[in-house]
Image (cartoon, helix red, strand yellow):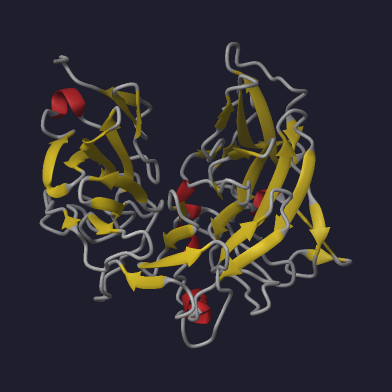
Amino acid sequence: MAGPLGPSAPLPDPQIGPSGYRDIAVEVGIVSTPVIDTARQVLYAVAFTKDADGHHHTLHALDLATGRESLGGPVRIAAEVPGTGEGGSGGRIAFVSRRHIQRAALTLANGRVYIAFAAYGDRRPYHGWVLAHDAATLALTGAYLTTPGTRMGGIWQAGQGLAVDDSGCLYFMTGNGGFAADGSELGDSVVKLTPDLTLADWFSPYNNAALDAQDADLGSAGPLLLPGTSLLLGGGKEGKFYLLDTADMGHFHAGSDSRIPQSFYVVTPDGNRHHIHGGPVYGDFPGGPRAYVWPENAFLRAYRFDGRRFATTPVTTSTTTDPTGVPGGSPGMPGGMLSLSAHRTDPATGLLWASHPYRDDANQAVVEGILRCYEATDLTRELWHSKMNAARDDVGLFAKFVPPTVTGGKVYAATFSGALHAYGLLSRP
């Protein structure tokens, strides 16, 4: 419907996605997570609209107090870079809104708003774009294309934004697409950019071609920078974690990934999909730091980190099988979207929160959801879930790829039921 940010794009639309496209239902509007600039007191958001002039992405800067446009906005998104790949002509490739979904969360860093793009259901031609806009003026300051000579290589990361290190460099993971061993094409890769969007380093698995052929996007989840180290952890549809050194990410080596610090399957391949979506979360709790992940068709699990490598056997694993009797409680996509919390600085109070489909596969479907809470150091202890008192706490319809938000002693859960739920203690000690 029409609103202050423009008319959304109703679905189905012959220009959006392939025939039978069902990844999004009803309409496309704001798909990514906005970002707030507390210094300027504005919220940046990218809206997808359709009007008489066609389809457009627009960057808005909204005043937090009034909701009105500020900083001279809005600004319609447009970019063009050198390239000869799909959709390019005359040695240039132009950004085409109707072929690109803005799914990854916006990232605010280095005085810029970074905006990443993938595709609606892999309808071509498309590429993986990263655009930088000045946070004060909204002017475009830079653009990077993952596949300037071929095709695809989108950046969606199940909604996760770009990671940023202390020097302001950006990290992201790409989906299926063209690849070249010299780094000029970076489908199914982990990419490091400088603040001005110059390629700084990268990694791609030795089986890049197999991942592309099997639709096993590395970029179905986002990267995690491990605190106090130069290491990055991430994995995608293959169900394998890659541990990289951001000072030397390893590039590509045919036949083996032995030159990176570590790689291992989070679930042994068994014929079932064990895709990772949304990315791992990290906590430093009694017994040592650990990373948590909840893949598809598997139990929630945590891996202990010794400062250099991860133990490849989980230190703790959930036992949840209700209500369907399968690992994790529901079959299929997308697994659990995770957040960690603790009371003040007391690690002994660590809690792992997970938003998850209740009993159905959420692939191209809107299904019932559940919010679960586990003891972070012992995942066999599920402390609470939203079905215990469904009349009071039920989530309703699952918001895919959206982790819980924990702040101020409350847990906030978005839904596809037209409501944002806030959970907290009924009485305080």
Q: Residue at x 21, y 30 (%)?
A: 394
On screen, residue 284 versus residue 136, left or right, reads left
Q: Is residue 265 visible?
A: yes
Q: Which residue extends farthest bottom?
A: 255
Q: Position of residue 124 (x, y in %)?
A: 64, 64
Q: Position of residue 285 (x, y in %)?
A: 25, 45
Q: Which residue extends farthest right?
A: 90
Q: Quadrant of the C terminus?
A: top left
Q: Residue at x 51, y 37 (%)?
A: 33
Count how many numbered circles sit on residues in the image: 0
Q: Residue at x 35, y 67 (%)?
A: 239
Q: Residue at x 44, y 50 (%)?
A: 228
Q: Position of residue 180 (x, y in %)?
A: 65, 78
20 up-or-down from 268: above or below: above
Examine the image and state in which quarter residue 133 appears.
Answer: top right
245 up-or-down from 131: above or below: below
332 or 231, which is in the foreground?
A: 231
Q: Position of residue 204 (x, y in %)?
A: 54, 73
Q: Quadrant of the N terminus?
A: top right
20 up-or-down from 255: above or below: above
Q: Is residue 371 visible?
A: no
Q: Which residue extends farthest top?
A: 66
262 or 268, which is in the foreground?
A: 262
On screen, residue 171 versus residue 366, left or right, reads right
65 or 84, which is in the foreground?
A: 65
